[in-house]
Image (cartoon, helix red, strand yellow):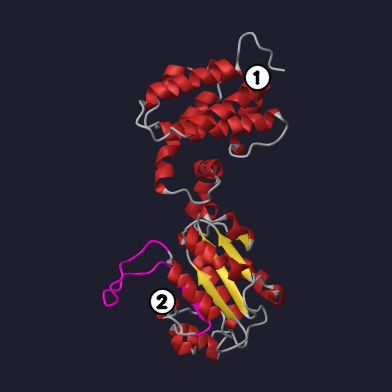
Amino acid sequence: MSASDTPPSLLGRAIDAAAALPEALRTHRDRLLLARHAFPHALLLAGSESAGLDRLAASLAAGLLCDEPATDSSACGACASCRLLAAGNHPDLLWLSPTDADEAAGRKASSQIRVESVRQLIAALALSPHHGATRVSVIQPAEAMNAATANALLKVLEEPPPGNVLLLISHRPLRLLPTIRSRCLQMRVGSTDATASALQDGVEAELAAFLRDPSPDAPAQAAWPAQRTLLDALARGDSITIPAASRITGLTLPAALAALSRWVHDLARVRAGATPRFLHSRAADLARVAARADLRGLLYMGRRLAEWQRHADHPLIAGLTVADILLEYRAELFPPTRNAA
């Protein structure tokens, strides 16, 4: 298979090799490229949609493919390789994304990366690089791979053929299969947008920690105000006002169960002397409530909430159901006759 035989869906990414990067991205790029002899064979770039991950991946690819890199190992912008990148037809840069519609081929647009596209990529990786000693393949966004597509990539991700580097871009890395994440060196990249960074320092940071997802989607953001209000109510311990907590505006049963499950999980962790996993910003509230909570009741509620999760999407009356769960929660964690030892 020659360069011209490479599937067109993997080619055609034009890159300005000499394009300037924000300082934060440049720092990541320079640190990786200066140690190019130890560059990971599979690198997962994780961050929010405002982090500029595609710009960082493009700059890394340009530096790795450049024929005459600068002293900081970045691309020179003038060599034959850099000119091929600028023209969008470098044979050793493969960029895999969800496919657009193709009327001629009778193909509809897809929000997923198709398994046949990954198989085309794997076939291309089996060949030696065409222009230099290195080929760079970018998968963006990696979470667009479904389970079948991701599993098809596992072997080549673990042991890519010599001369190949794979860069995976993900805004929601926890949606990737654990087997994908474990085969990559992961790099967390912060937002380059000042407004987004400021928001992440406040409420959005709490939501990101609550979900363990650096870039919560729109439904998660819409549910968060009601969940935050429920967490405020839970912070009152045994003095929680159940009628008011069960009638929080916009509180659905799935959202309530998600908040309760994380709250009880972190209460148990704090009770055992560990740090919160989901609710770091509420550590003081958790410590105060955990000190009074019954340990057996905590463990029981953990199991009960897991059972309720199986019914989260049933057409139940949310307010009444949440009230029942909160009554059980208060009775188990703060029983009048059981010692919280």
User: Where does the magenta region start and end?
Assistant: 91-112
Q: Along the line of sight, which residue is nearer the eye, 197 or 170?
A: 170
Q: Circle 2 sits on which residue? A: 9
Relative to residue 40, is residue 46 drawn left or right? left
| Residue drawn at point x = 41 percent, y = 80 percent | 8
SS class, disc 1: loop
Q: Amino acid at mark 2?
A: Ser
Asked if 54 appears above or below 198 in the picture, the reply is: below
**Badge 1: residue crowd in 10 Å (few <14, some 14–19, many ≥20):** many
Q: Along the line of sight, which residue is nearer the eye, 159 or 166?
A: 159
Asked if 237 appears above or below 130 in the picture, the reply is: above
Q: Main secondary structure of the magenta part?
A: loop
Quick check: is 280 in the magenta stretch?
no
Q: How far apart are the alpha carbons under marks 2 and 1?
A: 59 Å
Give x and y (percent) for residue 225: 43, 35
Give x and y (percent) for residue 180: 58, 60
Q: Which mark is residue 294?
A: 1
SS class, disc 2: helix
| Residue drawn at point x = 55 percent, y = 18 percent | 330
| Residue drawn at point x = 54 percent, y = 15 percent | 239
Give x and y (percent) for residue 159: 64, 71
